[in-house]
Structures are given as C-alpha cells and as structure tokens.
Amino acid sequence: MKKKVIIVGGGFGGVYTTKNLLRFGFEVILINDHNYFTFSPLLHEVATGGLDVPDIIFEYESFFRSDNFSFIRGRARDVNFENKSVLVDDLSLQADFLVIATGSKTRKRGIEGAQYAIELKTIDDAKHIKKNIIELVQGTKRDITISVIGAGPTGVELVLEIGQFINRLNDLMSNVSCKLRLINNTETILGNFSTKIQNYALDTLKKSGVEVCNSTNVVSIHSDYIVINNNRQLKSDMTILVAGVTPNAKCIDQKILHSSGHIQVNKFLQVTNYKNVFALGDVVTSDNVRFPKLAQVATNQADIVAMNINNITKHKSLVPFDLHLKGLLISLGRNKGAGDIFGITVTGFIAWFIWRTVYLFKTPGIANKLKVAFSWTLHLFTKRSLVED
C-alpha cells in the first residue's frame, strides 16, 4: 500500500517536495490557500509592469500530472504532529508523513501604522503597488515621493524597477516629479552579498536617483509621511514595507515552536521529537545553522526531505541537509544585475541574463518553462505594461 504524505504550503518548498515524492511513488496531498504557485522572486516585476500576472503564476494541476497527486484549496487551521493530521476548514486529514512548508510573512517589526504600508508577498500586493503608482503619477499631484522600507534583495530590486516604471509613465506625463527613497536600518544594503556587490548596487541606486537612507529606523508610518529616528518626518505618498520576513506558523501549536517563532528541525529536517514530520523553507530554524530565506535553499531542502521520507519507508539511513549556496544573484533593473557565482563576481547584462536563466529553470513544468521563456523574450522588445490589473 502506498504511503501518504500531506504537505502544508504550496511555495517553493512544498512544490519541489511534492515533485520529488511523486517520483518516489508516494501519494501526496498538497494544501494551499490558492490553487496556483506564485513565482515570488519576480513579484517586483509584476508590480512595475515588467511582467504580467500570468507570467509568474502556475496552476498546480498543470505540472503535477499524476494519479498520486491531489490538491485541497484551503487554509490549514490546525496541524497535529503527534497524529500526523491536518484540519483544513472542517475537513480532518491524516497521513503517514507530514511536511510543513508554510513559508513566511512580512515582518512588521512593531512599526506603528504598518497598515498604511503596502507589502509585497502576493499577486494582490503586486497589483496594488502597480495600481497605486499609476494613480499617483497620472493623478493630480505634480510632486510625489515613494518610500521602500527594507534594503534586502526585494527592496533594492523593487525600488529600481519602480524608477524604470515611472520613467515609462513619464513618457506620457513628463511634468511629474517623483522622488524615490530606500530606507535601511543597517549600515549597508544587501547584507548577505559581498562588499563588491553591495558597492555596485549602491552605485546603481545613486545613479538611478534613489535616495538611500542607511542606519535609519522607521518609528511609524502614516498615510502621507513616515517618522524616522529622532521623530523626523519624511514625506511619503506611498510606502512599501519589505523589511524582512517572519515565519508563517499560525497553524502550529505555539508551545511547539522555537522562541523565534520558527519550527525547530534537526540536521535531517525532521521536526524535533517527531520522526515522521518534516519542515523546510522560511518556517524552520536549527541550532547548528542559520538557513537563508532563499528559494534555492527551499528547493535544496525539498530534495533532502523527499529523500529522507523515502529512506524511512525503505529502512535506510537518513541524509543530512548540507547548506551550500551556489551563489547569490540580484536584478538591478531591466538588463542589469549583479551576483557572486561559485566565488566569481558578475555584473551588468550577463548577471541579469544568468539571473533570468536560473529562475527559468526553477519554473515547475516544461510547458510552463516554454511559456515563461516566450513571454520574457517578448518583453525584451516591448515597453512596460501600463494597464491597471
């Protein structure tokens, strides 16, 4: 009889674990609150007209063509590690193994008035950002300011894409003045990258006219201004909050969680004290290693989780997860990027092209890869979309 696995969460970790388990012949039930996979690293391009919504979302059924796969659209209300069961709405499900891949949500850092800021975690967020930018630039104001809080990869990529989007809008509304501001609470941007890449990105930001505010803490956010250190007020007609993430573990018994809010796992990615329960991606932590919250980490962990579930059923030894990053890449606007790959620093168009290629190959399903490749090629020769989604 086939062993059954329930996977909670349909992001990179959940999708790639599903893919691997189906190859091993397991019966897999995937639970997610949307019936599509969102290629989240490219949300900033949808938010700025560089890509369209269909370019980065893919229905699960389109790349899991297996009789052993089933999908349940809903939100897990309760997960019981002891019984290996999940309550989805009013339906209770039980399996031989559980995999938790619920990802993360935007970290608000206790900022007062955070509800006035827009996040960038979902398709709806991206559409909201795009609509707001269009309304501001094509509206009645002649002098606008947009602030992005958070200078990690998402913040840097987003603020540069916004600049190019506004240039496109200004082709039609040339008398609008727009100031872009990037707010960072540490001394340097892009903390996980090398100093060379940090400096290259900073130079790109400055040449693009972005005001970079390092060592700046946001105290509160309001509808048309923000308050920073020493109660100084900065005008901000639109504020976007991308200052890190926190684990999305609401469906897990809080008594089980680590003090940081993460799920504690061992070197095999098993949840502590539960042999047949695994977790991966942004929601996990370990005493021995800090897991970067990156798509490549989640997909690599998915390989190990699926392998270890298979090894348990075959009574084989488990394989530890070895964190080894192949490199870090970042987009710095259309046709420009930077990154460190196997210790080699690349910048400019080549880095951007590699960045795109890597994400293309991470797109699930051959048909989806072809669709994305065609769409990206088309976008190379077309202007950004100004249509409000």
Image (cartoon, helix red, strand yellow):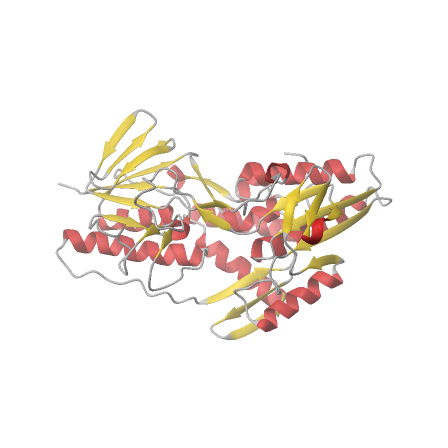
**Residue 56 shows up from this direction:** yes
Q: Please give the name of the residue rendered at 32% of the width and 53% of the height, measured from the top-left corner.
A: 264
Query: Looking at this rendering, what residue extends furthest in the top direction?
Result: 90
Say which quadrant the C terminus sits in: top right
Query: Looking at this rendering, what residue extends furthest in the bottom direction?
Result: 344
| Near-viewer residue (84 or 35) | 84
Residue 77, horizontal then vertical, whole percent? 35, 32
| Near-viewer residue (51 or 12) | 12
Q: Please give the name of the residue rendered at 76% of the width and 58% of the height, measured from the top-left corner.
A: 209
Q: Please give the name of the residue rendered at 67% of the width and 65% of the height, measured from the top-left corner.
A: 202
Q: Is residue 124 left or right of residue 205?
A: left
Q: Quadrant of the rendered structure where residue 36 is?
A: top left
Looking at the picture, does residue 329 appear above or below residue 344?
above
Residue 207, horizontal then vertical, whole percent? 75, 63
Query: Looking at this rendering, what residue extends furthest in the front direction?
Result: 230
Looking at the picture, does residue 130 appear above or below residue 160?
above
Say which quadrant the N terminus sits in: top left
Looking at the picture, does residue 121 appear above or below residue 377?
above
| Near-viewer residue (11 or 206) | 206
Residue 145, horizontal then vertical, whole percent? 76, 46
Q: Is residue 305 left or right of residue 135?
A: left
Numbered-mark total = 0
Q: Is residue 26 left or right of residue 150?
A: left
**Residue 382 shows up from this direction:** no
Residue 116, horizontal then vertical, whole percent? 64, 37
Q: Is residue 168 left or right of residue 80?
A: right
